[in-house]
């Protein structure tokens, strides 16, 4: 295996622990609320504090990555959020816990932009989607396995242990990344000469310059990419918050069955992200067309998601409905992974800045959708609440048609 793919696998582990750290608080919710004497509204604020900090820190993260390099910022982020993971059960009061979750959100913020910068420096033009799929696949696999590990830790060592163990794993991964990685392959002592020459001949090279924010903010594609990703993560945020409740209330599953089937959509999107990155790069190699490999694949994913969402509501068989739910969420993985490849395609040396902008939009969507979908489910029922999401996904599909992945943003 080429060395660059080994580092990409470490990013899979980073994505895995990042999303496990996000998900573990929901597993121990009842224990935390009892010990800290907080109600459901206050507990909801803890999640809001994370997303507010995470979204607000995206642009600053991109700027810092351009200045200090993706290696430093990846390690800094891992250690910072792992420390605040460990500090979570030690907070003592609700206000301190709120501060800890806010700082935890700040800590996780640089990871995706750092990965985009790493992908731009380490991978060729026709490898970027596959490279992006590693972090994303790890992220979506996190919610699949986090409940099982967290429950085992709670049952054997108490709920505090969940945060101590996960935080320690994050620091361990940071140490591994420190010893094997570098911001650029030219500075890495483990890479072979042949692999370095291949990377240098295949990647985008346009020099590291000051980020041209004024030019970016005048570019309609900059907004189109942000809007498309807003609705991508809008959907994943909705699933993260409401999927278990939807399965219980709308599909009539019991708690045990819900625990099993709630992981199916996340496993599906994990698989589609992993395979979709390779598929996009394969199409690019065959056709030499970024539009076919990126835009058309993303639009296909959005379209199939819309069809599956319609079937989720109108298919009467529960298991078949859950199958369409999982399949649709899986196909949403195609525009997700393609978006990160496009951020590298169009950003090039500014990949960290472009991806941080895109991820800012996405996490605003993730914070917004649980509120809207919850309100619609309460007022109009689950069928309307679920069908409504065909509209934002269709808007994302339209926005993607304005993105031209062939050209760098600065050249437009």
Image (cartoon, rainbow, N blue to C red):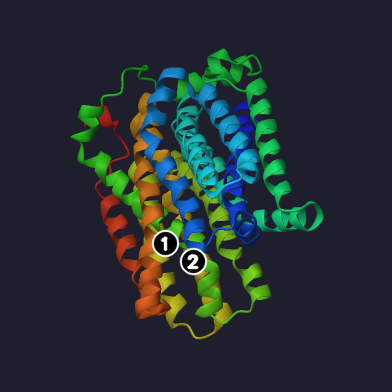
The foreground one among 92 and 208 is 92
For marks 1 and 2 on the same chain, the one whose residue lies earlier in the sequence = 2
Task: Return the x and y of residue 67 as percentages of the image width and height.
Answer: 41, 18
Across and down, in percent, residue 284 comes to 42, 41
Tell me how far mark 1 sits from mark 2, CA to CA. 7 Å
Picture quarter containing residue 283?
top left
Residue occupied by mark 1? 370
Mark 2 neighbour class, 10 Å CA radius: few under 14, some 14 to 19, many 20 or more: some
Task: Name the quadrant of the N terminus.
Answer: top right
What element does badge 1 sit on? helix
**On the picture, is 11 further left or further right than 246?**
right
Report if residue 292 is visible in the image.
Answer: no
Q: How many marks?
A: 2
Query: Mark 1 Cα within 10 Å, few/some/many (few <14, many 20+)?
Result: many
- The residue carrying mark 2 is 242
Using the rendered image of the protein, determine whether residue 196 is visible from the camera's viewpoint: yes
The residue lying toward the viewer, choosing from 290 and 253, is: 253
User: Are dots 1 and 2 in contact, CB under 8 Å?
Assistant: yes
Task: Give left or right: position of 346 versus 191.
Answer: left
Residue 16 percent coordinates (x, y) = 61, 45
Q: Secondary structure at mark 2?
A: helix
Q: Residue furthest bottom?
A: 316
Q: Position of residue 235 (x, y in %)?
A: 42, 59
Instruction: Depth check: give the residue in front, 116 or 143.
Output: 143
Q: Is residue 358 above or below residue 157?
A: above
> Horizontally, is 89 left or right of 371 in the view?
right
Q: Report the residue at 63% width, 60% height from top.
A: 34
């Amino acid at each position: 295996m080429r060395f660059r793919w080994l580092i990409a696998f470490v990013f899979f582990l980073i994505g895995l622990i990042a999303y496990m750290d996000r998900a573990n608080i929901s597993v121990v919710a009842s224990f935390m609320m009892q010990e800290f004497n907080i109600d459901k509204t206050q507990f909801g604020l803890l999640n809001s504090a994370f997303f507010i900090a995470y979204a607000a820190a995206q642009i600053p993260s991109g700027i810092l990555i351009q200045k200090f390099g993706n290696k430093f910022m990846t390690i800094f982020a891992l250690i910072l959020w792992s420390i605040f993971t460990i500090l979570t059960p030690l907070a003592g009061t609700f206000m301190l816990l709120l501060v800890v979750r806010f700082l935890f959100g700040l800590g996780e913020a640089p990871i995706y932009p750092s990965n985009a910068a790493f992908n731009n420096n380490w991978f060729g033009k026709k490898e970027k989607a596959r490279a992006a799929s590693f972090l994303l696949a790890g992220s979506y696999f996190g919610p699949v396995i986090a409940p099982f590990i967290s429950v085992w830790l709670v049952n054997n060592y108490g709920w505090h242990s969940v945060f101590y163990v996960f935080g320690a794993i994050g620091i361990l991964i940071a140490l591994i990344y420190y010893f094997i990685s570098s911001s650029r392959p030219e500075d890495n002592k483990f890479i072979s000469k042949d692999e370095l020459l291949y990377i240098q001949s295949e990647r985008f090279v346009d020099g590291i310059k000051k980020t041209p924010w004024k030019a970016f903010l005048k570019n309609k594609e900059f907004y189109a990419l942000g809007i498309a990703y807003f609705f991508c993560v809008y959907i994943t945020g909705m699933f993260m918050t409401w999927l278990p409740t939807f399965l219980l209330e709308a599909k009539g599953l019991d708690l045990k069955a819900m625990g099993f089937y709630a992981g199916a959509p996340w496993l599906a999107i994990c698989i589609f992200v992993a395979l979709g990155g390779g598929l996009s790069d394969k199409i690019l190699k065959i056709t030499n067309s970024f539009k076919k490999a990126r835009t058309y694949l993303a639009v296909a994913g959005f379209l199939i998601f819309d069809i599956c969402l319609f079937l989720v509501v109108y298919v009467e068989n529960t298991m078949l409905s859950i199958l369409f739910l999982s399949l649709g969420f899986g196909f949403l993985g195609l525009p997700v992974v393609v978006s990160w490849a496009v951020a590298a395609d169009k950003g090039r040396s500014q990949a960290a800045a472009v991806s941080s902008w895109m991820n800012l939009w996405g996490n605003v969507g993730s914070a917004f959708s649980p509120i809207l979908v919850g309100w619609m489910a309460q007022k109009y029922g689950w069928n309307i609440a679920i069908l409504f999401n065909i509209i934002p996904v269709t808007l994302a599909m339209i926005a993607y048609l304005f993105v031209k992945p062939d050209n760098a943003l600065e050249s437009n």
